[in-house]
Image (cartoon, coloured by chain):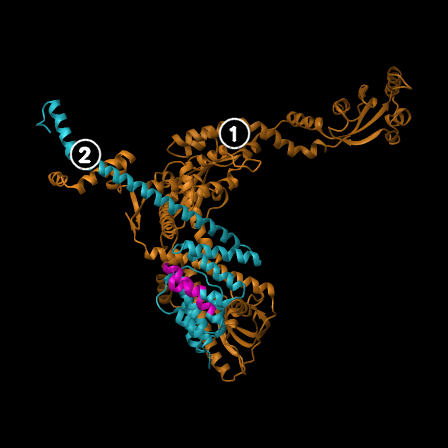
Amino acid sequence: MLQSIRDRSKSWGAKIIIGAIVLTMALFGADALIGLFTGGANDVAKVNGEPITRQEVELQVQRALRSGQVPPEQERALRGQVLDELITLRLLDQYAGDGGLHLSEEQLDRILLTLPQFHDQEGRFDREIFRNRLASAGYTPLGFREQLRSDLRREQLQNGLILSDFTLESERERLASLQRQVRSFRYHRLTADDLEAPVTVSEAEIAAYYEANAERYQRPEQVRLAYVLLDRQRLADEREVSEEQLEAAYAERARDAERRVSHIMVTFGDERGRDEAEARLEEVRERLAEGDDFATLAARYSDDTSSAEQGGDLGFISRGFFGEAFEDAAFALAPGQVSEIVETDNGLHLVAVTELDLPPLEALRDELREEVALAAVSDDFNRLNQRLIDESFAADDLVSVADDLGLARQESDWLTREHAQGVLGEPGVMREAFSDEVLTEGFNSEVIELDEDRRLVVRVAEHRPAATPPLEEVRDRVVAELTAERQQEALVALAETRLDALRHGDTPDWAWTRVEQASRTGDEAVPAAVLAEAFRLPRPDEAPRYGIASSEQGVAVVALEAVSEGEADAELEALVGRMAERLRAQSALTGLLEHLRDEAEVERL
Amino acid sequence: MAELRTEEEQLEALKRWWKENGMALVAGVVLAAAGLIGWNAWQSYQANQAEAASIRYQQLIGLASQERLDEAGLAEAQRLVDEITDAHDGTLYADLSRLIEARLAVEAGDRVAARAVLGDLVQASEDAYVRDLARLRLARLQLADDEPAAAVATLEGELAEALGAQRAELIGDARLALGEVAAARRAYRDALSLAERHGQALYGVQLKLDDLGQEGADQ
């Protein structure tokens, strides 16, 4: 072959080709040429000859996993979905590209600037935010632009298909008139009592039914779990709390409780000097010491006339209204005590506390006990949590861990992945129980953080795969279901003979239930199957139209008597028109995808 | 080149080679460069054209997504449609713009214009799917104009399978308008089963079917 190239290289054509190759290499590097001949090993699919690479799929899978919306055990299924999705997108991209849909760099720039995700607080594009957002979502700026470009192109396509659809007046009118139609009918329910003989089922029939419906009786994969729960609340409940601790906690509360205060205020200024004012309050203090009543003294001495009349009472106060000096004094007092002289902008005060806004200790006992106990077990909880993490990882069983930590090892009943109660039914627990490590390998689970206060470790005590239980175990259910089915058949057969008689003019003395002018949506009193049947029957002429409504809820004979136009409803009319249009546009879109898939050559490698 | 021993000889050989082939190489380089420049110019012309179409189309979409268009808006939309179909014929932009043009005509109450636009698309669009969509919409206009036979003719023939459910519904409407109740019922049933097979939802088909009543109950 080399020889033949050399021979032909004498010719002008070949020389020009070689020149072109040299130039290509010089301008774009050897990669451009090599890329033409290699590659392909990394492709997972080809869409009309265009490859989708493993990296593209992985990138999307990782993105989805990182978003946390997909549990890791669904990764396999996810990978398949991602590939399907990428193929679909590629098909649309190709269609849009072939059709000449295009977005230039300038158009992209302009749109990028308007995206609110990249705006700062003033609503302007921020380069820094742009870069950070992209990085955290796993995009390079260039990759993001390309993605945005295809998104926008597809959007142009979709918009064109959706916005070009229309609804004609005649179509709207027809749908609305069907939708608002009302029908009057009566119905009679047939019950087991109407049957000549009760339905019976034989052993052979039971066995056959069980065989035929084996799938329905299948028991899903189940586990029995052993588990250890570390619960801060339980630790606290078990914790001893002494009377002293309770009192200390109560005192703590009392210190900051709102309180009712009284005061005696003496002002000073032009008319009276500070010394004089102080002397006046000292006098009050002496009289208090002699046993005089604060309220009486307030009425006599206080310059705060409005409170003086109430014996100095200011009502309940909390911090933040009366100034620091006044409040420091008030919050340092127990009920019945009177403060030293306090100075504020208004003058000098004596402050007394008359009442605390705090129930007595007895009423708060339980609450305080819990508060004290929770605070006291905090360290224990953290220490036990750490030991639980370490020991459950190291141990080959759960018993030793539970014993070591002084926690109870509990066991559950048989549980399925979807149906677990109590603590085992909380999010994430069964996922952990059915994980490879726990289910297959038989290890203790990781420590599951249920919430701030609870940690759980589970271990599979017993596991049984999905299986069909023997007939004896599910016999009752089989008999019940088979009987119900047979009964319905018998009732339908009975209804059919009655129907025949009715059509021939027979008039049974049934207690018909009448329904006047029911709309399609009906009312709850009418069984759905009856209503559906009434709207499915042809319009009656002279005689009513008869039909049978059969559902799991029972069997009924329906007699349709009249069909009429419901009341015109502009709102309804607009609604049905819009709904029909939206669904049609949706079908045009999904239809395009299907069409492209049908026409395309998709090769999965 | 093991036979060329000294540097002198090698240089001599190179010179000879250059003398024999130099012109060809240069010509090759020049031609390739010219080709590249020409290609780039063509590409950038194409890109400019495509950008112009894209911008116009985007404006049209902006207008078409408004709840109601006034006279001025309609005129502006029509101007854009004309520009796009004139300057960018053969692109999807042109096809989609014409589909939008038909809708605007329907809304303006001009079914004749809408039918003309859709009829054009059915004849002339290069895109099979657009042609099929246009056929479905044209048939609906024909039904509204009380021409069920024409609608049936429009709907006959090959059509994208994914649009089969919509076609079946329209055939049902047409058959009913022609008084062929049994055929209409069959068509509506087809529409329901096709919609289910393709995972689509069609509003109203069940209502239309129910309204005809089941066969056999006609006695």
Of B206 and A440, nearer the camera is B206
Give the number of the disc on residue A144: none
Measuring 63% from the left and 27% from the top, which residue is drawn there?
A242
Looking at the rendered structure, the kind of residue marked 2 is Gly
Of A318 and B205, nearer the camera is B205
The CA span between labels 1 and 2 is: 86 Å
Looking at the rendered structure, the kind of residue marked 1 is Phe
Determine which residue is flagged by label 2: B22
Is A326 a magenta residue?
Answer: no
Label 2 sits on a secondary structure element that is helix
Near mark 2 (Cα within 10 A), the count class, few <14, some 14-19 or many ≥20, is: some
A200 horizontally vs A373: left or right: left
Label 1 sits on a secondary structure element that is helix
Of B61 and A408, nearer the camera is B61
Determine which residue is flagged by label 1: A381
Please say whether residue A416 is visible from this viewpoint: no
Q: Position of residue A556 (x, y in %)?
A: 51, 72
A259 horizontally vs A459: left or right: right
When asked about the image quadrant of residue A272, the answer is top right
- Magenta segment's dominant SS is helix
Q: Chain ID for label 1?
A: A
Look at chain B in the picture and name its colour. Answer: cyan
Q: Position of residue B32 (x, y in %)?
A: 26, 40
Near mark 1 (Cα within 10 A), the count class, few <14, some 14-19 or many ≥20, is: many
Q: Position of residue A170 (x, y in %)?
A: 53, 69
Q: Which residues are magenta?
A: B117-141
Disc tally is 2
Of A353 and B166, nearer the camera is B166
Q: Which chain is orange?
A: A
